[in-house]
Image (cartoon, grey):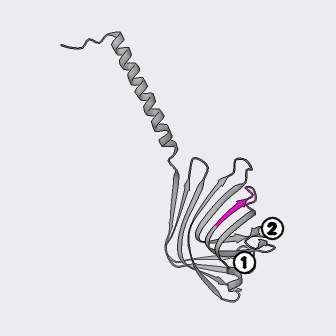
Amino acid sequence: MTRERTPARLTRTAGGATVALVLALLWAAPAAAVQPGRLVNYFSGDRVEHFPAGTGCTFDVTVYLTSRAQVTITDFSDGREVFEVNSMHRTITSDTTQRAFVENLQYRDVEWIDPTSGLRLGESSGQFIDQFFPGDMTPYGVTDHVVAYSIVGSQSYVLDPNTFATLSLTVKGTITDICGAIS
């Protein structure tokens, strides 16, 4: 016995297939929307970076990188951007005094825009460097000069989204003034 393909049966089958397709698309759309965009950069070999006075400290600084580094940037559909950094054996040296500060960067930083205020909010944790310019809020108040701190711990901050000026900062952990240590 064979099934007869009547117009009513084809309509029910097509209707069922349509419902199944719509349900599949509704289920797949949120799954596709939550997939973050990810960019991984690897840096290897010895590298030297020079920072003139006013860009790292109030004096010229050279940074020597002697190992592999990795930076991963992940963008989420809700607007968060996550930076994960691993850069070991960095030596920051004053070009004037030749004093050196050896550190490792191993941290996670998350930033997003507050929909109410429009300000950029962020949280960092691990071992990282934060740099501040005149007018920025630092762990010790508003600064009138360029300064860089090595922080082991965590921080939360608020930035002006146009100028990236630090408006507010809370730090928990150990803070070392890199410029002070090598001056």
Q: Earlier in the sequence, mark 1 or mark 2?
A: 1
Q: Residue at x 52, y 78 (%)?
A: 46
- Give me the disc on residue 135: 2
Say what secondary structure mark 1 lies in.
loop
The percent position of residue 107, horizontal first and vertical second, equals 56, 68
Above or below: residue 22 compared with residue 133: above
Q: In the displayed structure, would residue 66 be above or below residue 29? A: below
- Quarter of the view holding residue 51: bottom right
For residue 160: magenta?
A: yes
- The image quadrant where one finds the C terminus is bottom right
State which quadrant residue 101 falls in. Answer: bottom right
Q: Is residue 70 left or right of residue 123?
A: left
Q: Secondary structure under badge 2?
A: loop
Residue nearer the viewer, 76 or 41: 76
Q: Residue at x 53, y 51 (%)?
A: 37
Disc 2 marks a residue whose amino acid type is Gly
Amino acid type for the residue under numbered disc 1: Cys
* 107 up-or-down from 98: above or below: above
**Quadrant holding the N terminus:** top left
The disc at residue 9 is none
Do the CB atoms of the residues marked 1 and 2 lie less than 8 Å apart? no
Q: Residue 106 location in percent, x, y?
A: 54, 71
Q: Residue at x 55, y 67 (%)?
A: 85
Q: Is residue 85 magenta?
A: no
Part of the protein shown in magenta: 155-165
Dot 1: within a 10 Å radius of its alpha carbon, few (fewer than 14), some, or many (20 or more) residues?
many
Image location (x, y in percent) of residue 115: 70, 47
Kindly identify which residue carries mark 1: 57
